[in-house]
Image (cartoon, rainbow, N blue to C red):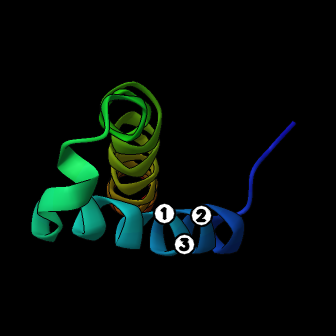
Amino acid sequence: MRLSNRFIRNLHLATTPIIGAFVYSDALRDNEVFVTLVQWGVFPLVAGAGLALWIRGYLARRAANTRN
């Protein structure tokens, strides 16, 4: 299954506010379930989506330059 850049971008943008809530809300950082969810679910998802978006563009540009 190939994921489109649009889907990955939307996933990245939709989960980023959860990271922001974790950073700026003391009440949420005190909740162990929320902390575990962010550390083991949301953050890896956001980081992976951002990395996928970056690496796809990098590889596409590199492939376009080698075809010449």
Query: Mark 1 highlights which residue?
Result: 15
Q: Amino acid at mark 2?
A: Leu
Q: Amino acid at mark 3?
A: Ala
Which class describes the residues within 10 Å of circle 1: few (<14), some (14-19), or many (20+)?
some
Which of the 4 image quadrants contains residue 43? top left
Q: Is residue 19 above or below residue 52?
A: below
Badge 2: how crowded within 10 Å, few (<14), some, or many (20+)? some
Q: Are marks 2 and 3 in contact (CB under 8 Å)?
A: yes
Percent across and percent down for residue 57 are 40, 62
For image coordinates 60% across by 74% down, the residue present is 10
Q: CA distance from mark 2 to mark 1?
A: 6 Å
Query: Can you say which quadrant of the picture contains the N terminus?
Result: top right
Q: Label 2: which residue?
A: 11
The residue at 28%/54% (across/down) is 28
- Circle 3 residues within 10 Å: few <14, some 14–19, many ≥20: few
Amino acid marked by disc 1: Thr
What SS does tag 1 mark? Answer: helix
Q: Residue 12 or 23: which is nearer the viewer?
A: 23
Q: Is residue 26 left or right of residue 33?
A: left
Q: Residue at x 12, y 60 (%)?
A: 26
Mark 3 highlights which residue?
14
Q: Are marks 3 and 1 in contact (CB under 8 Å)?
A: yes
In the image, is 23 to the left or to the right of 56? left
Tell me the CA gap for discs 2 and 3.
Answer: 5 Å
Q: Nearer the viewer, residue 67 or 26?
A: 26
Circles 2 and 1: CB atoms closer than 8 Å: yes
Residue 60 point in image, percent of width and height: 46, 58
Count the marks: 3
Secondary structure, mark 3, is helix
What is the C-alpha distance between the residues marked 3 and 1? Answer: 4 Å
